[in-house]
Amino acid sequence: MADFEQMQNLSEAIGYKCEGCGAPVEFDPQTQSLRCSHCGLESKIDFDTSVNERSFEELFDCQPWQGGIKVIQCQNCGAKEVLDKNEISSSCPFCGSPSVLEQDELAGIKPDSAIPFKLQKQSAASKCLKWLKSRFFAPSHFKKNVKLNSVKGCYLPTWTFDCQTTVFYEGRLGQRYTETYVVNGKTMTRTKVRYFNVSGRLDKSYNDIYVKGSEVVNDKYLQRIQPFDMKDYVKYDDKLLAGFEANHYTIQPIDAWHTAEDMIKSQCRQEIVWRYNADEVVYLNLSLTHHSKSFKYLLLPVYISATNYKNKLYNQYVNGVTGKVTGKVPVSPLKVALTCLVGVAVLVGLVLLLGS
């Protein structure tokens, strides 16, 4: 009875309650429903898949995220998290610090869409432990005694952009070729470059160019747990935050668009070079015009774990759909040194073998 009363008290701190017993409910990735932690009653969520893009003008005039949520900030690492307005967060998902304070307001816009978690927390923890124990350069003592201090499901903010792009270009490229000649009866070869001028037009269509919305997670880790299938996203629903958190964006949408522009320009430059099978670029000038621009604010599902070793924190990240894992682990200097010595020994052996 005491456990049930404790759950009832907890339910007062959470926005969503079980219709049957009043206990707290959480979003269940396996069934895609709200599930009661006491009686097991499930309430299926009818997700809306008709996600609309925002017109580009809204980059400068976005309506704020109001009602139903609150924001907390970690006093240790500075991360801002969005929770259901009545939910209690006891620790930061990024650094594990209990020093989290509620902020008075949440400035910014509400997400348009999200990819719901499909991987259970227990599965994410299991995959993370397996990954940690498989790290070759991690200290043996760490791998034998590794344990996760915390595992939390957190939605990471992402801006996505669509546009039609027209590129006018002109430049000078070069193709390498091999020339054969004879010197004193001996056939020789040399590589030369044939240069030529290019100009033309390139039309491209871009859909869901995504740019990270927060600096809290290093972009290299997000890249390593890709891909997230953009076909899985649904219209944002507050129910997704039941039992989960959402990292609030720190990169403004207009700044994200400038990053997307740079990505588009780089891709166009690469395609033009490939078009002419060029090996060298003397210069290549591009003039880009973007049409039918639109964007949306998307949340990506990621489990974040925190592991301590010798008073140092290491974070791991698990794709909340596929279970792909990446992150930081401690490194054994001895293992690195031995591997380098073995590598040098093998290289010396090959040189001696070829020399003989």
Image (cartoon, rainbow, N blue to C red):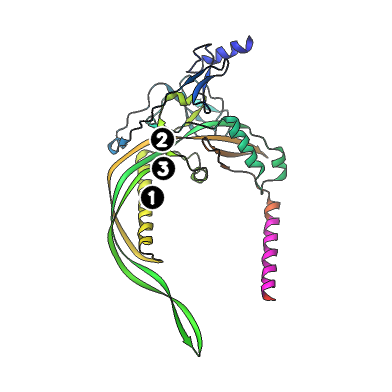
- Residue 273 location in percent, x, y? 37, 61
Q: Which residue is mark 1?
A: 263
- Residue 185 location in percent, x, y? 50, 90
Instruction: Please tell me how crowded label 1 is: few (under 14), some (14-19), or many (20+) other residues with Cα within 10 Å.
Output: some
Q: Magenta stretch? A: 337-354
Quarter of the view holding residue 139: top right
Identify the residue at image location x=41%, y=35%: 298
Q: Label for residue 12?
A: none
Q: Earlier in the sequence, mark 3 or mark 2?
A: 3
Residue type for callout 1: Met
Q: Earlier in the sequence, mark 3 or mark 1?
A: 3
Quadrant where the C terminus is found in the figure:
bottom right
Q: Label for residue 211?
A: 3
Instruction: Please tell me how crowded label 3 is: few (under 14), some (14-19), or many (20+) other residues with Cα within 10 Å.
Output: many
Query: Label 2 to label 1, Cα distance in Å?
Result: 19 Å
The residue at the far top in this view is: 1
Quarter of the view holding residue 303: top right
Residue type for callout 3: Val
Q: Which residue is mark 2?
A: 298
